[in-house]
Image (cartoon, rainbow, N blue to C red):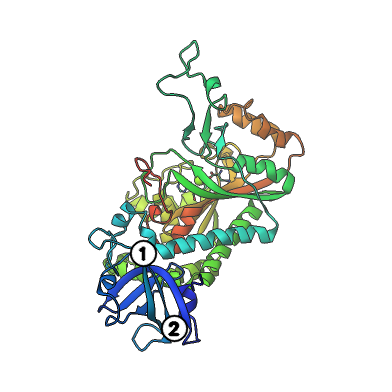
Amino acid sequence: MSRTKIKDLLNATEFGKRVTVKGWVRTFRNNQFIAINDGSTLNNIQAVVDFTTTDEALLKRLTTGAAVSVTGELIESLGKGQRVEIKVNELEILGDSDAEKYPLQPKKHSLEFLREIAHLRFRTNTFNAVFKIRHALAFAIHKFFNDKGFVYMHTPIITGSDAEGAGEMFRVTTIDFDNVPRNDDGSVNYKEDFFGKSTNLTVSGQLEGELAAMAFGEVYTFGPTFRAENSNTTRHLAEFWMIEPEMAFYDIHDNMDLAEELLKYVIAYALENCSDELEFLKNRLLEEEKQKAQNERSELDLISKLNFCLENNFERITYTEAINILKSSKPNQKKQFKYLIDDWGADLQSEHERFLVEKHFKKPVILTNYPAAIKSFYMRRNEGDAEGKETVRAMDILFPGIGEIVGGSQREERLDVLQNRMEDLHIPVEEMDWYLDTRRFGSAPHSGFGLGFERLVLFVTGMTNIRDVIPFPRTPKNAEF
Ligand code: 4AD
Ligand code: MG
């Protein structure tokens, strides 16, 4: 079998060749023009059948969605809208698609509708573009780290520790719910469970990443993570992919530099390698924005937005500076925020993050030095906090339209400080002994961060709902497909 991909044929300059194309019918017009797509490009190839010599029953089977194989001569097209076309000699239907029943008709479908038929939405241009970009970004991430000598570390999906405190966990068990083994006091006896203890799906590979960083120097994970938080928003998934680099001998500034470099690298990679897809999504967005009032439309189109991100330094400010800006901001003064900012120490909500990024700075922002009380136990405590305010070397990167895209920190490398902090927070220190060993034997300053992959894909594609950038989204009350 020698099938040529449509992407290659559309760029071909040699005409008169005999070629075979396999793909799916997008449309069939005037009983002669078949638009075929094989997924290799957003663009279709036009195949022209001679209806005077083709069996009528066969022509009837050329319906939207049908899988076909056509063989014929590649010729220069006389029609408008395409450069090349195929003059069909042989036509074979590989798989019929009943026009009465096929849900994807050649017209505009809403994203909500397509979400319900996520098993078929790959076949639309929008999702072809989104998932090509998703692929390119994943590849670029691996390339970035590989080129720098980072080691890709596979941290476990099933974990026995629940210390990260990043979110609610999904329990992993083989216990028979109709016959639960119990201790004398009535509690569940996890010794009888598969692993002989209580286990969960991981919320983050960070803690294991730290162990590896203390030997390899620079490592990263890129895998699925799970959070059972009941947040039904356009930014949260119960199953999402996260990239977590962890680096020995990096302080918070090195950490920020790496994160900014990574984000710019992968955005530039997409601009360079997915220009057709980005162009398509840019136009799709412009079309969609026509429904909106002038003042609600984006100032920059998708491609300009991505370029803007590359050309400008991310704004780096401390939490304290952010609080001061927010306190005196218009929406705070006019009580338009749902959560008003009164005092230092308040946790920032997405409305505050978005104000800083979209209204105040109008560019990506890196926030550092958060109050210790609202951040994780493993973050490096700052010395000499002003006015007795305890802060940690955390850094969150906030993106326009997205909010938090990266969360990270320098890590607490001092055993006694870390242990005290864990005790204060009632984290079972004995169970975490393996983690503390890194601080017992050859501890060193180190840092890392987590980049939410779907939030990155959201930003680059300009899609607005996180459910539309992962093939089969898992959200509260939804695990279809
Ligand atoms: O800020 P988070 O919770 O940080 C951690 O898990 C650290 N252990 C990372 C590290 O330092 N190694 O999550 C990191 C990022 C967030 O900034 C966000 O982009 C994404 O993961 N994220 C989610 N994405 C989709 N759905 C959710 N429910 C998410 N929760 C976090
Ligand atoms: Mg976070």
Front-most of residues 120 and 324: 120
Instruction: Residue 74: name its quadrant.
Output: bottom left
- Does the rendering let one see residue 251? no
**CA separation in Å, label 1 and label 2:** 25 Å
Query: Depth check: 54 or 271 in front?
Result: 54
Residue 283 quadrant: bottom left
Against 197, is 273 above or below? below
Where is 179 relative to 480, above or below? above
User: Relative to 55, is 233 on the left or the right?
Assistant: right
Label 2 element class: strand
**Residue topped by disc 2:** 74
Task: Name the side, left or right, on which 395 lies relative to 473.
Answer: right
In the rendered structure, the answer to whether residue 352 lies left or right of residue 155 reads: left
Kind of residue at disc 2: Leu
Q: Amino acid at mark 1?
A: Thr
Percent from the top left, x then y, of residue 141? 58, 58
Residue bearing the label numbered 1: 124
Report which quarter residue 343 is drawn in. Answer: top left
Residue 394's disc is none
Q: Position of residue 481 (x, y in %)?
A: 38, 47
58 or 244, nearer to the observer: 58
Horizontal and vertical percent position of residue 265? 58, 64
Task: Please tell me which residue is depicted at 42% across the width and 73% down the height of the picture.
Answer: 279
Classed neighbour count for the residue bearing mark 2: other residues with Cα under 10 Å, few (<14), some (14–19), many (≥20): many
Looking at marks 1 and 2 on the same chain, the residue that comes earlier in the sequence is marked by 2
The residue at the point 58 percent across, 38 percent down is 388
